[in-house]
Every structure is written in C-alpha cells, then in structure tokens.
Amino acid sequence: MDKSVSWWEPGDWNGFFGLGTNVLVNLLVLTGLLKFVIGIPDETLFGTILPAIGLMLFLGNMYYAFMARRLGEKEGRNDVTALPSGPSVPHMFFVVFAIMLPIKASTGAWQTAWQAGMIWVFVEGIMLFLCSFIAPAIRRLTPRAALLGTLAGISITFISMRPAFEIAETPIIGFVSLAIIFAAWYGGVKFPGKIPGGLLAIAVGTALAWLSYAFDWGFGNVNPGGVSGSVASLGFNFAWFELGNLWAGREFLALVLVTAIPFGIYDFIEAMDNVESASAAGDEYSVREAVSAEGIISLIGTLLGSPFANAVYIGHPGWKSIGGRVGYSVATGVMVLVLTWLSIVPLLLSIIPVVAIIPILLYIGALIGAQAFQATPKSHAPAIILALVPNLAAWAKVQIDGSLGAAGTNAAQVGFDKMAQNGVLYQGMDVLAGGAVVTGLLWGAMVVFLIDRKPSAAGVTSIIAAILAFFGFIHGSAVGWSVSPTMALSYGLVAILFFAFATMDAEPQAAE
C-alpha cells in the first residue's frame, strides 16, 4: 500500500544532531589529515577537495533518504529510517598514511600524492560497484550473527575506542557531553524547550571549553586567533571535474591495485553488514542498490577531486531508536554541502572542541555491539564473539604500530621474539589483522553453521577462507599469489575435518 511519507519528523532533530555531528567530526579529521600530514595548501584543500567531498556526501545522504521515502511509501508506514552515510573512516587513514604520505615522501609533491589518492578511490569504487551484483546472494547465504558480529567488532574498536580515550583525556567536557547524550538517547530524558540531546551536548561542551579558556582552567583547547582567521577565509567554492589530476594518477595504478581491490571487498562486506543491521531494526533495503549507490557516488566524488570514499555508515538502529527518519539524512547532506562550499569547516574546527562531539560515537558503538546479540538467536552468541576477534587484532596492531612509529622504529626492528617475551604476539596479531572484517565474517559463519548442525556448510566456508587466504584477501597485507599459504593450508585441513564431521552423529541442538 502506497502512503505519503513526510520529509521531516520531530525525531529527525535528534537524528540530525547525531549523524550530522558524526559526519562533521570525520570531515574535520580528514581536513586535518590533508592539511597537516600531506601539506595540501588551503587554496586546493578548501577550494577544490572539500567541495568535492561535500557534494559526494550530499549525494549519498540524499539518495539514501530517497530510498527510505520510497520504502515507506511502498510499505505504508512513516517510521522508516534512512541508511546513514558519510566519509569512510578506515579509508581516511589508510589512503593518507599508506598511499598519499609515502608518495609525498618519495616525490616531495603534495599534488602527486593527491592524484594517487584519487586513482586509489576510483579503483576501489569500481570494485565496490561490481561486488554489488553478488551482494544479495552473499547476504542470503551468510548467517546474521556473522554479519552483525563482524560489524560489532568494527564498532567496538575503530568507532568507540579512540573517542573513549579522548573523553578520558578531557573528562570535564567529555563526560558531561557523554552524560547528556546517554540521558537523552538511552534514558529518554526530555530537556527544557525540547532541545535535542545531541545539540545540547555539543553546546554545553563548547561552552565549557571557552569558559576554560576565559578563566585559564587548562582544558578545552580552543583558539580565538584561529576563529578570526577562519572568519576571514569564508567564501564560496563549488566542485568541478578534476579529470586531469585523476588521469595523472595512472602512473600509480599498479601500486594501488593491490590494496584498492581488497578495500573494495572490505567496503562491500561492511555495507552489506550495515544493510543487515537496518533489516534487523525493521527496515529492509535492497543490498544491491545500497552497495552500488555507494560505489557510484564514490566514483563521482573522485572525478571531482575527492581522495576519499563515500560509505554506508554504521548506526542505523541508533538513529532509528532516537526518532531519525528521512529528514535527518537530508539535513546532514545539506549541512555538509553548505559547510564545504562556503568554507565554514575551518571556522567550526576552531570553535567546537572535538571532545564535545565524539561521545556520539560511543553511543553508536554500544548500540551496534548490543544489536549483534539482540537480533540473533541466543545460541549464536559464541559466533558473534569469534567474529569480534580479528577486528580486535586489527585495532591492537594499529595501536602498536602507531606507538612504535612515534618512537622511530617498528616491530621488525624491535624483534618479534622480544615482543613475544613481553606478552605481545605481534606476528599472530598481524596475521589476524589482514582482512579482519572478512575474516570475522567467515569465522562467525563457520561457528553458526556448526551450532546449527551444518558441518558441511562450515566446510564450504572454510574452503572459501582458504582460497581468500592464499591470494591475500585475508591474513595478508596485499593481494598476490600464495600470500598466506600456511593459513590457506590450515583452512583446507579444517574443511576436511568439517566434512568428516558431517558423516558423524551429532547431539540435537538445544532449545533456545
């Protein structure tokens, strides 16, 4: 039954101040990476790259809002929540530190690094679009516990941990903002004047930061000089095609292929997980359409000069639970377009302390982690835990590598044996970290199939894992021939065992 779906509901304010500020944080982070790590001058950064990213994010949020409105009209309900969308966070760091920075270091040219980043995202977007055609079949064959379990692994590690550390470093602002968000979105507290919890948290955190500056209390990290300079830089910029710079990046095509293809698969799995998460929350979207839109919109952004990809975000159940529907997605897209095309991003970067915004990420991390257990059979809980493990390893490796890098060394120079003697099994961590999202999905699926007394299906999953490991899609740092032969052989032996178990009697599955 078709029914008119409104563009805005009261709960969209909560959704907007949640998703909008989440996207804003990532926008501020990627701006800092390009400006201070790669050294891209303000003229190009704020005049070309950010307008391209802004248009890309606008298109993503508008398209997913359109999908939500169409679904609501089809099913005759007004409570459909749009898939959240924003810049892909893992890509931000990977493209900057693994692709752009080494090229900047070897060539000394920021423009060359930017061109390499563009061609990387272009290849990754094509891979994502191609994967969208097999998405429905993979989603249908993969247990929900495996999909949501690996998603929970990402949310707990890469979404929640850094914000938790930043809150602990600036607790007066961080904990106050966190308490307001939790009270509003978990506790259902209604603030005076019906002020959205997200907006109040940011406003209070910002006020505390500026009071700290005024009275020299020693926290907050705001800079009035930066505000005046940012005001002077306000102006209008729009996105236009950067085909010349994209084409110039072709010299790095061989370099980017070995990582862009696995990341395309990673994005595909993560987007599929997020669509499954939305389904578990009551909104059944076409995974093929959602994934292909993600790829096409990333390609459009790259043609305009963006070295970052668009992504379907984690968090749909969270925004749905606080009343987000269609309008919060539209408002987020419009906000990003205005901020980037009018060069307002530097101004916000100097006014709002990031620690006042990031508690929202903790809310999302907790909600997604909980959903993995709430939306799956209780008997599948062990599979969810196993799906978390590779993502925990990937996060821990990032922390160790960052620490050693700050000291001017790396794990190989320190010595794997010395690290093992001190309880850090770096080599095993490195193996699990490669393709962690896909590995978590495969591990979770194998355990679900065993719990459901389907050892043959677990055997097939293990064969798939063996093939992926052999070519480096999992347990490897790059795609190639015989990248992880030992892991491939191990999965092959496990597959043989699983097929043998299929010939044996098994105890009946316990009742839920």
Image (cartoon, grey):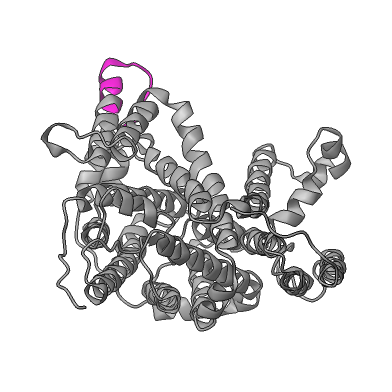
Residue 264 point in image, percent of width and height: 56, 72
Q: Nearer the viewer, residue 261 or 501?
A: 501
Q: Is residue 287 magenta?
A: no
Q: Nearer the viewer, residue 412 or 287?
A: 287
Segment colored magenta: 209-222
Residue 354 point in image, percent of width and height: 37, 38
Q: Answer with left or right where residue 7 lies relative to residue 135.
A: left
Q: Answer with left or right where residue 270 lies relative to residue 501.
A: left
In this rendering, the answer to whether 390 lies above or below 217 is below
Q: Nearer the viewer, residue 365 or 415?
A: 365
Residue 251 point in image, percent of width and height: 59, 78
In this rendering, the answer to whether 29 lies above or below 330 is above
Residue drawn at (31%, 64%) of the image? 82
Based on the displayed image, in which of its 4 quarters is residue 8 positioned? bottom left
Is residue 307 something that shows in the picture?
Answer: no
Residue 344 point in image, percent of width and height: 24, 51
The count of marks equals 0
Is residue 417 something that shows in the picture?
Answer: yes
Residue drawn at (28%, 69%) of the image? 68
Residue drawn at (21%, 53%) of the image? 12
Q: Quadrant of the N terminus?
A: bottom left
Q: Answer with left or right where residue 123 lies relative to residue 77.
A: right
Q: Nearer the viewer, residue 286 or 15?
A: 286
Work out which residue is located at the far left of the displayed protein and give it.
Answer: 193
Based on the displayed image, in which of its 4 quarters is residue 330 positioned? bottom left
Q: Answer with left or right where residue 243 lies relative to residue 54.
A: right
